[in-house]
Image (spheres, rainbow, N blue to C red):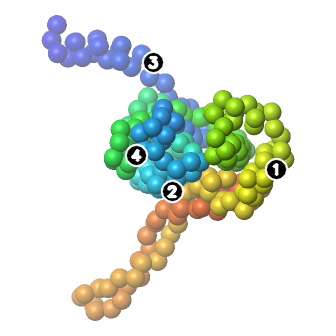
């Protein structure tokens, strides 16, 4: 059996489960940190419940993913997760799921590890959303999750600061309503409504066209060019205003 025959034989086994996303379906990439509780607590000893160094490493990673060869319309991060809305007509790698998941997980893991100078890894999956409304719902869902996570995290660490052990702290907040959790924080001197928006809603990323001043040495005249740059939004709007923001970056 020569090489060409062997190659043809083995390719069948390699690609037998090579699924591709159907056309005319939105793709949202969901990327999550693996074992980040241990990484942030035991390895890096980040400040709880939020640390600006961790936030900035996640921001850098999202920006890298938006510039690494995939047509990303909108990016979002909260906690240790990243979501990327790809162009509606994206056909990179023939829309093959294994290519998207393996490459983007690798790009995320490599860039974030370099950013914090510690080994870290992410997993990746693709959400296939057939309607615009489901895209809105997806990102509003992740924002609501960010709000819930922030509220629970502040409650938990407020109790831990009072020398409660982890299990007792979890039990005390497990059955509290949102109003009761806000009251718990208020008793510890924290008004949840006054916290910075990025902690409660996450951070958004989208492309903007900006004017750049330049100089033409041949004509000795100033020039004006347009360039695309990534805008990082730390104060995302909520509810319908957030849907309007998302819709403004759709490409169909």
Q: Secondary structure at mark 4?
A: helix
Circle 3 Cα neighbour tier, 10 Å, few/some/many (<14 / 14–19 / ≥20): few
Q: Which residue is nearer to you in this view: 41 or 208?
A: 41
In this rendering, the label closer to the viewer, 1 or 4: 1
The residue located at (80%, 33%) in the rendering is 175
Q: Which residue is mark 2?
A: 52
Residue designated by label 1: 183
Work out whether mark 1 precedes mark 2 in sequence or the reverse, and give the earlier one.
2
The nearer-to-camera label among 3 and 4 is: 4
Give the quadrant of residue 98.
top left
Apparent side of residue 40 relative to residue 219 in the rendered image (left or right):
right
Residue nearest the observer in this picture, 226 or 207: 207
- SS for callout 3: loop
> Under tag 2, what secondary structure?
helix
- Are discs 3 and 1 less than 8 Å apart at CB? no
Kindly report the distance in space between the C-alpha atoms of the residues bearing marks 1 and 2.
Answer: 26 Å
Q: Quadrant of the N terminus?
A: top left
- Give above or below for 171 relative to 234: above
Q: State the residue position of label 3.
A: 17
Taking the image as drawn, is residue 18 in sight? yes
Neighbour tally class for label 1: few under 14, some 14-19, many 20 plus, Cα within 10 Å:
some
Front of the two marks 3 and 1? 1
Closer to us: 26 or 186 = 186
Q: Is residue 111 above or below residue 208?
A: above
Please name the residue that numbered disc 4 is placed on.
Answer: 112
Q: Earlier in the sequence, mark 3 or mark 4?
A: 3
């Amino acid at each position: 059996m020569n090489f060409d025959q062997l190659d043809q034989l083995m390719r069948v086994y390699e690609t037998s489960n090579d699924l591709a996303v159907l056309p005319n379906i939105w793709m949202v990439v969901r990327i999550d940190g693996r074992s980040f509780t241990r990484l942030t607590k035991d390895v890096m000893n980040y400040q709880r419940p939020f640390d600006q160094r961790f936030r900035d490493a996640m921001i850098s990673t999202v920006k890298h993913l938006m510039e690494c060869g995939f047509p990303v319309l909108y990016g979002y991060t909260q906690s240790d997760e990243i979501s990327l809305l790809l162009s509606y007509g994206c056909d990179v790698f023939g829309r093959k799921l294994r290519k998207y998941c393996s490459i983007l997980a690798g790009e995320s893991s490599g860039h974030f590890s370099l950013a914090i100078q510690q080994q870290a890894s992410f997993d990746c999956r693709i959400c296939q959303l057939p309607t615009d409304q489901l895209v809105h719902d997806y990102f509003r869902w992740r924002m609501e999750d960010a709000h819930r996570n922030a509220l629970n995290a502040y409650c938990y660490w407020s109790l831990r600061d009072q020398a409660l052990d982890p299990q007792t702290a979890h039990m005390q907040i497990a059955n509290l309503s949102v109003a009761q959790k806000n009251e718990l924080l208020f008793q510890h001197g924290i008004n949840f409504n006054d916290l910075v928006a990025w902690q409660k809603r996450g951070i958004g990323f989208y492309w903007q066209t900006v004017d750049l001043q330049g100089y033409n040495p041949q004509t000795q005249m100033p020039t004006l060019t347009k360039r695309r740059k990534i805008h990082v939004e730390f104060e995302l709007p909520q509810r319908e205003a957030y849907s309007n923001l998302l819709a403004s970056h759709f490409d169909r």
